[in-house]
Image: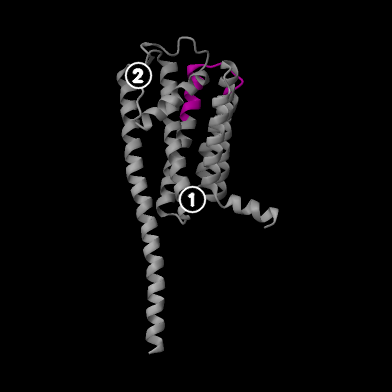
Amino acid sequence: MSSLERVQAIRRRPYRNIFYAIVTLFFADALVSDRLARAALVDVIVVLVLFAVLFETVRSRRHAAVALVLGAPAILSRAVGTFIADSIGWNNVVLVSTALFIGFLIWNLLRDLLVGERSSSERVYGALCGYLFIGLFFSLLFTHMEFRSPGSFLLRGGAISGAAESEAALLPTFTYYSFVTLTTLGYGDITPATTYARTLAWLEAVIGQLYLAVMVATLVGIRVSEGLRADGGRTGGGEDEDLGAG
């Protein structure tokens, strides 16, 4: 296989590419321990992930125009936010643009998994990407809530955001909390302390369980249906040949 053919084969697997990109960047974030460097890296990671997803979406989806309209502001606002001081007003812009883009990606991804023409392996990677996007979406909401209203969440009974210099500095903590909540693991070290925070937490937990139950069942059903159709085609072909021979 030539280099061009390898590149084309890779580009035909957008969900696999996105999944690997997200996991790789998560590991990069986990390896950085310095607080200030990590806060800057978090913004870079989010920008790179959004850019990678936008590239794959625009290249492979019918909704390219909508993806560009929602994705470009999300990427640009987060990129600019890396170089300016945090403020509630600017962070509102960043949150809204990023949340809208990720929300569109989740909707478009689920629609493509259910009605699009994808291989079984791509459907699985797409479902995994959707699960990670849900966790990222809620991590942004939790982070912004705590930065805007300190005390919305407590860490072992104490404040989380007291020493935080920026919203980006809080994001790693709430990425951890979001995925712990999404999987209903619930260590209990971080607890929601206000009504809005508790509502978001139980909503994420319910969505996470419904997603796994519904999407896994749907993917299994699609895979079984494809197998039955393939077997039926082979069986039907054999019967036709027998009738013709008779």
Disc marking residue 191: 2
- The x and y percentages for residue 171 are 48, 23
Secondary-structure class at tag 1 = helix
Q: Residue at x 31, y 25 (%)?
A: 199
Q: Is residue 236 magenta?
A: no
Which residue is under mark 1?
Answer: 122
- Give the CA separation, mark 1 to mark 2: 36 Å
- The x and y percentages for residue 46 are 54, 30
Q: Is residue 95 magenta?
A: yes
Left or right for 107, reference 195: right
Q: Residue at x 56, y 16 (%)?
A: 35
The 10 Å Cα crowd at callout 1, few under 14, some 14 to 19, many 20 or more, is: some
Residue interval drawn in magenta: 81-96
**The C terminus lies in quadrant:** bottom left
Residue 72 visible? The answer is no
- The x and y percentages for residue 69 are 53, 39
